[in-house]
Amino acid sequence: MIRRHLMALRVALMLGDGATAVLVFLAASFLRFRDGDPAELWQSIGIDLRLAALLFAGTWITVLWFSGLYRLSVRWRLWTEARDIARATLVVLAITLSTLFLFKQEDVSRLFLAFLFICQPAVTLGGRALLRAAFETIRRRGHDARYMLVVGTGRLAQDFADRIESHSGLGIRIIGHLAAPGEDERVTTRPIIGTVDEIEEILHSRVVDEVAVCLPPSAARFIEPITGLAAGEGKTVRLPVDPVEEILPTALHEEFDGFVVRSLIHDGQREVGLVVKRVVDIVGASIGLLVLSPLLLGTALVIRIRDGSPVLFRQTRVGLHGRPFTIYKFRSMVDGAEDQIETVRHLNERSGVTFKATNDPRVTRMGSWLRKTSIDELPQLWNVLIGSMSLVGPRPPLPTEVLHYDIWHRRRLSMKPGITGLWQVEARHDPDFDRWVEHDLVYIDGWTIWLDLKILARTLPALLAHGGR
């Protein structure tokens, strides 16, 4: 669980270490050779300055990796970090000197090397300390928090929850405990929000990302049904257990602050990929909003002139693991259209819990064109930028739809909803809601960055071929 929750910090440290290595190498070159052009001086001995900086950065990150400086733990000490960086510095120095000797580059300035290998470890240590402090502050303030439900009220549940909350950098918030029949004691100081029998209702009414099952042997009969229900809905399941117990032998085993934790993780070992997905979302949404800003402003102006205010349509949707968020679209219906839903219910062309009517009388003339071109969806790029949506993912449902979900439907909430998705390029006009969900689950189970890129590439042709909605 450490690897999963600190993956963003791990990636940030790698990027930071690489960037500082390049900058320190360039700074050392310019300071040492400030009386001339550093690039020309390096070129005179057959080395391109930019390539040399990149090679140094790559070597630096590689040595830090093999020195264990990216194997993060919940207990971080500055002295330990400084010691490990010093050891890595000696290794990189040895590699550098050996390389220069092999390639007969004795002309490289010794003063340059001294400056480089004094400043680099100092800058790395300082940068890492600042990154950790920033990460800790962001998590402590609740940004990107994950919410854990603890099943159990005994000593094990209390101790495990205490350890979780003592490490605020993990970003995990305990929402409460569930009591189980057969527990000999109840020592938790946190609220008991229900019993094991009420777990399904609680999972459906609260935002729950993870379920920690901390039950004594006397209540062990509840472990299998609880893990089955939670994992079936896409929740991450944690079981802090005695190392000799054979509970969930196929689960991921990790050590966490004195506990052996066995985990069932719905999205497998895709932590790095999910960080990359978020980076792609931020970059893609930023570029999209910038490039499309004339179209967005022009559309807003036309809607304001033709149909009046409001220009944007705001609606509550359900996101990752039940998180409510406000979705933004250009208004394509008459103002107050949601209050008229019952008057057009008979026009519904979809089976299941969703509503869709081709000739919906609430749609304005301008709105019909916006929907046909899908321009009304473009403001959702803002949702992607702030993190409530992704460029690619399951369709974001309404709260009223989620209330009628079957258990297997709810697993589609285990990934952020997207502006487009497999459902849009393959089942956009399929009237069967279950078919939509099947496509979403195929996407979730087989997700890769490459799959996202393929779906994005197929979205525009799908819109042109089918004429929007």
Image: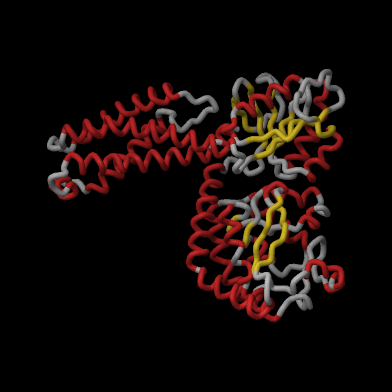
Quarter where residue 377 is shown:
bottom right
Measured from the top left, where is residue 18 in percent x and y? 37, 41
The colour scheme applied to this rendered structure is secondary structure
Check the image and report above or below for 286 versus 357: above
Asked whether residue 104 is in view, the answer is no
- Determine the residue positioned at 44% across, 38% down: 13
Check the image and report above or below for 129 versus 29: above
State left or right for residue 348 relative to residue 263. right
- Determine the residue positioned at 80% across, 25% down: 220
Asked whether residue 227 is in view, the answer is yes
Check the image and report above or below for 387 versus 145: below
Please name whichever residue, 116 or 449, is drawn nearer the observer in this view of the structure: 116
State left or right for residue 46 relative to residue 271. left
Measured from the top left, where is residue 452 in percent x and y? 56, 57
Please name whichever residue, 445 or 5, is drawn nearer the observer in this view of the structure: 5
- The number of discs equals 0
Please name whichever residue, 420 or 325, is drawn nearer the observer in this view of the structure: 325
Measured from the top left, where is residue 399 in percent x and y? 77, 55
State left or right for residue 254 relative to residue 131. right
Q: Quadrant of the C terminus?
A: bottom right
Measured from the top left, where is residue 285 in percent x and y? 53, 59
- Determine the residue positioned at 73% across, 73% down: 333
State left or right for residue 102 relative to residue 204. left
Q: Quadrant of the N terminus?
A: top right
